[in-house]
């Protein structure tokens, strides 16, 4: 049995007393100084911490409450087995597993196995695939493990995921791993707020830019660093803010690496010359991260658990719910920073890869915050366009908002107060550097760089195409697909079993959206015939269009949603239903 793979941030575990108060006991008194030897490639682990890794055919998980401490401040958390992140679940391709999940909360809960192919009844989405886990009850998730790779688990009930209920899943292959490495570390990235997510949502509903501390100022206008006065007036007339890149930012979030803030400095150990595999998971509620190890190149070997042809880069953006496996090979006896920087550059977190304990890599200065452009409105490269002489034809600028006059361009979109804009010229941006990385002076991974290691198994031409618009009124904080919120009775998206279909995701908003389909993988159409990257989540850039080819091979009802939690909670959620073709021979 595997006993340790990486050192998590220890929690002060909460124990419910008769008075319903929470008493604190330190699980790991030296958590701030602990580090991880990591998992060795031959299966022997070593750690001077007490990280919990669960494996075997029967695994017990308990959902509970605790107080979480970061940066010298404590807050209420919802945890798995008393820690944040929860324990690593380490499985083997081909095995059968029973995960017995006990809910000790005073509210319903659940666990979804993100990216793991399971029967829909085991998928863990209340109201879609099962009723949820009532307080005091235990639910047994039973399924065969059909794959290998890096995945994760999280609650799909209320806002529990944002409050700490998540953890990593590592599935080892049956045969020889395609990736050669000497040591591995699992790195779970997340965001943490001492403000309850429901209160965050209330404030965003009242003032959509409530948490945005990066807005342009008079001094930035005078310095010439940001938009000109003319540009600001134009954007203001459209009620658009070029700094509105993420809803809740680093002014209110603490960013975490394996539950540690920068001050606590999560540390993973290595020996110079080793090939170190980093399994990187973005378990955030609302934050897309730009990830780099200054001075140490990374070779990407897997995306969303699926092998890709190795590609070397210096930085990549990881959307919420995505996973990337990278190989690094530190050759000198020095410490390297692991940097997860929010895409709007309002904050970051530093961990350390080090040859010994007690070493902390330098924390770099946060880079200059980016600004959105007309391209992020879905208007192409319009820098030199004269907005006063008909270049905005087809656009309705009345009332300060921007809308398409011709509804036939997107006839399935229900126009109304929940749709402030439709992108007039959405572009395939999969070959472009993602938000905030357009101007850095080193290599940046793009989706176009990703090519599957093995040929795609289903090369049929899709029998039909389906456009899905990602829609919003950002000022009113309303989010939807095709202008319809889930609560408004959005009809399921129906597929026949084994149908091959092309889905076109069109982002009519000015924020990136990580779109996730449960129960399936899809091929991201990047132009590389038969070697499109295989993913379960794709981050659609603002004003962008992404096409994926899906083989709907999993019967049942499946959640389909933006993985930004507050977007999903306010309407950007649908159900995909896959049924047998009764007419098939």
Image (cartoon, rainbow, N blue to C red):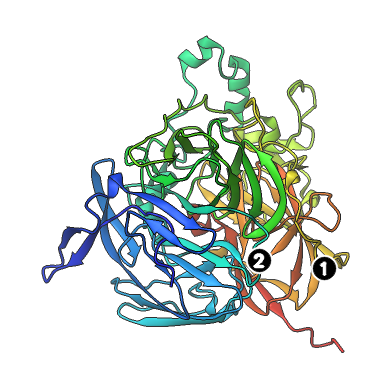
Is residue 574 visible in the rendered image? The answer is no
Q: In this view, does 182 lie to the left or right of 424?
A: left
Q: Is mark 2 on a helix, strand or loop?
A: loop
Could you say where residue 201 lies in the image, as x and y percent from the top left? Answer: 41, 50
| In the image, residue 519 above or below residue 510 | below
Q: In which quarter of the image is residue 204?
A: top left
Q: Which residue lies furthest to the left in this view?
A: 19
Which residue carries the number 1 mark? 458
Q: Which mark is residue 272?
A: none
Q: Do the numbered discs 2 and 1 sit on residues whose CB atoms are within 8 Å? A: no
Task: Tell which circle, 2 or 1, labels the residue nearer the N-terminal end.
Answer: 2
Give SS at disc 1. Answer: loop
Q: How many marks?
A: 2
Observer-nearest of 51 and 381: 51
Determine if residue 11 is in view.
Answer: yes
Q: Name the residue under label 2.
A: 176
Is 105 placed above or below 12 here?
Answer: below
Q: How far apart are marks 2 and 1 (CA)?
A: 24 Å
């Amino acid at each position: 049995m595997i006993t340790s793979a990486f050192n998590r941030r220890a929690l002060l575990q909460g124990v419910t007393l008769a008075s319903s108060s929470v008493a604190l006991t330190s699980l790991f008194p030296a958590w701030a100084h602990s580090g991880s030897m990591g998992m060795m490639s031959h299966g022997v682990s070593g750690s001077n911490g007490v990280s919990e890794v669960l494996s075997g055919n029967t695994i017990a998980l308990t959902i509970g409450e605790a107080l979480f401490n970061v940066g010298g401040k404590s807050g209420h958390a919802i945890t798995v087995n008393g820690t944040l992140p929860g324990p690593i679940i380490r499985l083997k391709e081909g095995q059968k597993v029973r995960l017995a999940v006990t809910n000790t909360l005073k509210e319903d809960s659940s666990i979804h196995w993100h990216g793991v192919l399971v029967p829909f009844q085991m998928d863990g989405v209340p109201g879609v695939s099962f009723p949820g886990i009532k307080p005091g009850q235990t639910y047994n998730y039973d399924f065969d493990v059909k794959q290998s790779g890096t995945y994760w688990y999280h609650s799909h009930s209320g806002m529990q995921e944002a409050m700490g209920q998540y953890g990593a899943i590592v599935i080892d292959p049956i045969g020889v791993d395609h990736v050669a490495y000497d040591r591995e570390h699992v790195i779970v990235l997340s965001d943490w707020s001492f403000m309850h997510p429901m209160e965050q949502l209330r404030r965003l509903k009242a003032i959509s830019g409530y948490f945005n501390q990066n807005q342009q100022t008079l001094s930035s206008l005078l310095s010439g660093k940001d938009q000109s006065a003319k540009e600001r007036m134009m954007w203001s007339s459209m009620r658009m803010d070029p700094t509105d890149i993420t809803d809740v930012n680093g002014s209110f979030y603490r960013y975490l690496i394996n539950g540690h803030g920068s001050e606590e400095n999560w540390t993973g150990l290595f020996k110079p010359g080793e090939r170190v595999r980093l399994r990187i998971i973005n378990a955030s509620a609302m934050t897309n991260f730009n990830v780099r190890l200054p001075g140490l190149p990374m070779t990407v070997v897997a995306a969303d658990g699926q092998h890709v042809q190795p590609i070397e880069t210096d930085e990549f953006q990881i959307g919420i719910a995505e996973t990337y496996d990278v190989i690094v090979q530190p050759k000198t006896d020095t410490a390297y920073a692991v940097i997860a920087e929010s895409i709007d550059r309002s904050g970051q977190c530093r961990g350390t890869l080090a040859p010994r304990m007690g070493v902390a890599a330098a924390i770099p200065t946060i880079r200059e915050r980016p600004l959105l452009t007309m391209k992020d409105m879905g208007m192409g490269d319009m820098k030199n366009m004269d907005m006063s002489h008909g270049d905005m034809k087809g656009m309705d600028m009345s009332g300060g908002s921007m809308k398409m006059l011709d509804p036939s361009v997107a006839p399935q979109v229900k126009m109304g107060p929940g749709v402030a804009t439709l992108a007039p010229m959405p572009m395939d941006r999969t070959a472009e550097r993602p938000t905030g990385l357009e101007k850095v002076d080193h290599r940046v991974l793009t989706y176009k760089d990703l090519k599957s290691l093995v040929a795609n198994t289903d090369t049929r031409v899709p029998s039909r195409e389906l456009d899905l618009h990602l829609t919003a009124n950002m000022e009113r904080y309303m989010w939807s697909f095709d202008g319809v919120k889930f609560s408004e009775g959005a009809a399921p998206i129906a597929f026949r079993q084994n149908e091959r279909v092309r889905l076109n995701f069109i982002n009519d908003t000015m924020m990136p959206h990580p779109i996730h389909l449960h129960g399936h993988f899809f091929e991201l159409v990047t132009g590389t015939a038969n070697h499109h990257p295989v993913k379960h989540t794709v981050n659609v850039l603002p004003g962008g269009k992404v096409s994926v080819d899906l083989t709907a091979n999993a019967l049942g009802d499946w959640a389909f949603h933006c993985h930004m939690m507050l977007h999903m909670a306010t309407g950007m959620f649908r159900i995909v239903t896959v049924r047998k073709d009764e007419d098939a021979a």
